[in-house]
Every structure is written in structure tokens, then in C-alpha cells.
Image (spheres, rainbow, N blue to C red):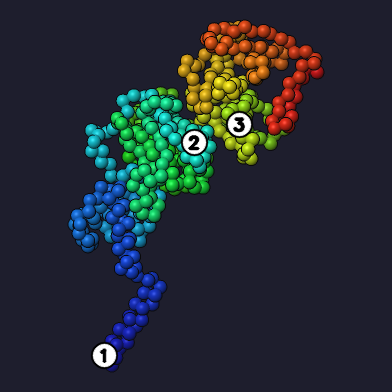
């Protein structure tokens, strides 16, 4: 009877094993080998692992086992040292191309820039986005770091820059496994130091779909400034790419502590603050019948509408309207714009705030600005202008102060720093102005 009972138990265990094998099929030998190859490549690229030529056999003191444990500990996985399913899933996710184990064998100590004003240049752009959107994403990514440090970033159109930015497909070891690296950057230093490369095999976007350029750029520029990867899964310096909420300020305490350890606090405030608290007011009510704009101007084929700290961008060929902070496009400009106009033949846009003005080409300020308005011929007691527009046919600029005065300015061609002839007119009953957008009369102003 005992023999019979023992045989029944064995039969039950065999049936149980068969059921479990059916419910949880084991990996085939080929699948195990392929998974091991993916993990090995991942460790070689991001953890400094060097293959010794021997096949992997799990042992507690095996060099590869130690590297797997190091990776599992970094990402908060169960530290087994084994190529389990969680580890295999991790190595197939998209991520930054910068190693998690900082080598910096060619750099002494903690690499950082020895100056506070850094230049950058876009060598090329991605066809996935409009060039202006690429510029805006890059500028916004730099402003993430400048908002909490004394650092300032200036864009250059030509020549060498501290941080050179480029896009390309297959220009560095990439698809070592499904997912692969989306971008990589070098630590501060000479030559390639600070440079950032973005993979054109990605679909770059300004939304949560595809690969968000701003978020990846903020991460890579952290490397360009000297930061390593963070273990904080909510920090932008976490190495694995993930979707994020664009309405939430991206830096976390871990990122801020790291960058301020290298460069110190922001000159504006010694306290760590979320820049959105002071820079981003509530969204203007675009549906309000009382909505007015502070300034409107054409801009490289687009139309810009300014309101307080914000502006809208509308391209005639694109249905959507973009909405931005003024400082995200021109970080050196005070909040708000009083008046603006474009001189298309010079590819220049003039922006006025208070008694000062700036001349920009794209998102780059031209050398020599800011300047005071009186060099245009205004009286020094003019505190601000309310509106302006450029008459291309006459080569003249008309500025408005209040609702009763027009100031006609004809800028000198060869001597822009010399005061211009300025004439003053009063509005008469017959003088009217129209704003046209694609043959639609938006508003008519008249003294009647």
C-alpha cells in the first residue's frame, strides 16, 4: 500500500510539472543564446564589460555575472546576476547612448566647463521637424539647466562652438539590441568634448508621440555639462527613455543637486525653485471676445502674436497654432513684447520692450544689442511704443504711441547707430489701418 501511494504521488508530480510546463513554456536553447547575446552587448556598450572569449556559465564570481548584478542594482531590479526576464526586457528598451558606468579615462577628476557662458551650434537639423521647432526645442533644453545655474548658452550660426549638435543615421554603434540608443553626448572638454549626436533613425517630435526632441536634448546636454546618469526613475538623467508630461517641469531634485554641485546655484536666486512658478503665468483665454495682442509681426513666413509672456506662431500652410513662452525662444529677452516688425529683405525682426529694442535673426540676437530707442530718433522721454509696422514699399517704419500719434522712422542703411530723421503725425479722420491675414480682415483701426 505504501508503494502504491508513493507511485500515486510521483504520478501527480509528473502531471503538475507537465501542466506548469504548458502554462509557462521554457525558453528554447536558441532563445536563451539570443537573450544572452543581447545582455552581453548591452554590458559591453554601457557597463564596460569586456568579453574573455569564453561562453557564459552562471557563477557568482563570473565577471559577466558581476556586471549583470551591477546593472540590476543600478535599475532597481532584483539583484540575481542571472539573465532573467526582467533583465532581458530592460536591455530592449530605448535609452541614452552614454554609459551608466562613468569611465572618463581621458578626463581628470570631475569634468566640467571652466566658464559660465557657453556657445552651441546646430551643424544640421532633422527633417522630422521644422527648423524653428528644432531651434526652440534645443534652446528650451539648455534653458532647463541655465534656470538653476549661472550658466548661459549662446547660439552660433557658424564657426566652432563649445557644444556642436548634429543629427545622423548610423554614425555610431547603435542598434546593438531592439530599442537601442537614441542619442549620445560627450563630457566637457576639447575637440568632441560637450558635443551631442542625435540618431536620425528616430522619429523626432515635439509631442509625447515618437521621440520627444526637447526631453532627449535636455538629457544629453546634462552629459555635455558633466552629469552622469541618475538612478532616479523620474529624473531626466535616468538613462532609459520614457514618455513624460510636457506640462510638468522636467528637472528633479537629483538633477538639480548634481548640476549645482558642478556649477553652483543660479545667479538670480540661491534657492532651488521650479522655474514654471515664476516664468509661466496662466494660459491666456484664447476664446475670450476681449482678447487683445500686445504685438503682431510676420516672422520668416509665419505670423507671431504676442501676449504678456507668451506668443502664438501660425504658419499659413499649417493648420495647428503653436504656443510658447517668449523666453523659451529668446531667453535673454524680458518678459513680454510691446511692439515688433519684420524687415524680410534683411531677414531681421525688431522687438521693442520699454525704451529698448533688439534686432534678431531667427532666435539669435545680432551683435551690439540691446540698444536704446533714442538712437532711432525718439525723444529720451519716450518710455515705450505701443505698436509698429514696416512699410516695405517705402522702406519706412511707423511707430504708434497711444492712439493719437504716428512716428515715422526711416532707418539709415549704412549707419544703424546714428539717430534717424523722425516725423510726427496726428491721426486724421481719413487715416485707417488694416491687419490682413490670408485676405481676412482681422481688425480695422480708425479715428472715426
- For label 3, count other residues whose C-alpha is less than 10 Å away and answer few (under 14), some (14-19) or many (20+): few
Q: Nearer the viewer, mark 1 or mark 3?
A: 3
Is 205 located above or below residue 422 in the figure? below
Q: Is residue 285 left or right of residue 63?
A: right
Q: Is residue 151 visible?
A: no
The residue positioned 61% from the left and 21% from the top of the image is: 341
Query: What residue did someone put label 1 on?
Result: 3
Residue 302: assigned label: 3
Where is residue 74 shown, x and y percent of the image?
31, 49
Where is residue 195 shown, x and y percent of the image?
36, 34
- For label 1, count other residues whose C-alpha is less than 10 Å away and answer few (under 14), some (14-19) or many (20+): few
Label 1 or label 2, whichever comes before in sequence order: 1
Q: Quadrant of the N terminus?
A: bottom left
Where is residue 339 shown, x and y percent of the image?
61, 20
Do tag 3 and tag 2 residues touch (Cβ < 8 Å)?
A: no
Q: Is residue 198 left or right of residue 448?
A: left
Query: What residue did someone put label 2 on?
Result: 134
Where is residue 415 shown, x and y percent of the image?
53, 9
Q: Nearer the viewer, mark 1 or mark 2?
A: 2
Q: For residue 100, what is the image quadrant?
A: top left
Is 367 located above or below residue 2 in the figure? above
Total residue callouts: 3
Q: Quadrant of the C terminus?
A: top right
**Local SS, label 1:** helix
Marks 1/2: CA distance? 78 Å
Amino acid at each position: 500500500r505504501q508503494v502504491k501511494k508513493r507511485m500515486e504521488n510521483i504520478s501527480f508530480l509528473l502531471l503538475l510539472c507537465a501542466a506548469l510546463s504548458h502554462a509557462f513554456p521554457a525558453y528554447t536553447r536558441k532563445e536563451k543564446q539570443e537573450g544572452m547575446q543581447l545582455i552581453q552587448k548591452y554590458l559591453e556598450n554601457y557597463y564596460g564589460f569586456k568579453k574573455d572569449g569564453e561562453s557564459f556559465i552562471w557563477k557568482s564570481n563570473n565577471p559577466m555575472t558581476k556586471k549583470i548584478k551591477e546593472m540590476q542594482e543600478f535599475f532597481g531590479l532584483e539583484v540575481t546576476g542571472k539573465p532573467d526576464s526582467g533583465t532581458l526586457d530592460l536591455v530592449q528598451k530605448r535609452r541614452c547612448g552614454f554609459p551608466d558606468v562613468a569611465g572618463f579615462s581621458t578626463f581628470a577628476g570631475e569634468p566640467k566647463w571652466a566658464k559660465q557662458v557657453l556657445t552651441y551650434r546646430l551643424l544640421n537639423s532633422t527633417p522630422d521637424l521644422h527648423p524653428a521647432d528644432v531651434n526652440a526645442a534645443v534652446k528650451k533644453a539648455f534653458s532647463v539647466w541655465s534656470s538653476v545655474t549661472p550658466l548661459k548658452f549662446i547660439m552660433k550660426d557658424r564657426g566652432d562652438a563649445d557644444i556642436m549638435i548634429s543629427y545622423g543615421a548610423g554614425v555610431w554603434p547603435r542598434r546593438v539590441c531592439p530599442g537601442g540608443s537614441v542619442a549620445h553626448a560627450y563630457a566637457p572638454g576639447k575637440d568632441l568634448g560637450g558635443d551631442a549626436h542625435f540618431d536620425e533613425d528616430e522619429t523626432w517630435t515635439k509631442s509625447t508621440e515618437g521621440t520627444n526632441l526637447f526631453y532627449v536634448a535636455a538629457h544629453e546636454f546634462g552629459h555635455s555639462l558633466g552629469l552622469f546618469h541618475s538612478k532616479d526613475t523620474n529624473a531626466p538623467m535616468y538613462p532609459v527613455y520614457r514618455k513624460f508630461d510636457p506640462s510638468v517641469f522636467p528637472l528633479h531634485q537629483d538633477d538639480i543637486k548634481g548640476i549645482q554641485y558642478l556649477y553652483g546655484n543660479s545667479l538670480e536666486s540661491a534657492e532651488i525653485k521650479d522655474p514654471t512658478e515664476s516664468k509661466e503665468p496662466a494660459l491666456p483665454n484664447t476664446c475670450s471676445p476681449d482678447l487683445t495682442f500686445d504685438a503682431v509681426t510676420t516672422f520668416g513666413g509665419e505670423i507671431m502674436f504676442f501676449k504678456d509672456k507668451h506668443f502664438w506662431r501660425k504658419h499659413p500652410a499649417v493648420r495647428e497654432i503653436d504656443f510658447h513662452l517668449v523666453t523659451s525662444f529668446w531667453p535673454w529677452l524680458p518678459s513680454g513684447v510691446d511692439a515688433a516688425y519684420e524687415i524680410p529683405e534683411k531677414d531681421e525682426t525688431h522687438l521693442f520692450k520699454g525704451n529698448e529694442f533688439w534686432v534678431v535673426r531667427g532666435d539669435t540676437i545680432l551683435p551690439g544689442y540691446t540698444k536704446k530707442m533714442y538712437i532711432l530718433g525718439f525723444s529720451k522721454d519716450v518710455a515705450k511704443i505701443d505698436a509698429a509696422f514696416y512699410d516695405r514699399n517705402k522702406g519706412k517704419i511707423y511707430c504708434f504711441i497711444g492712439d493719437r500719434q504716428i512716428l515715422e522712422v526711416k532707418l539709415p542703411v549704412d549707419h544703424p547707430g546714428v539717430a534717424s530723421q523722425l516725423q510726427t503725425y496726428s491721426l486724421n479722420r481719413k487715416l485707417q489701418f488694416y491687419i490682413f491675414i490670408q485676405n481676412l480682415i482681422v481688425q480695422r483701426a480708425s479715428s472715426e
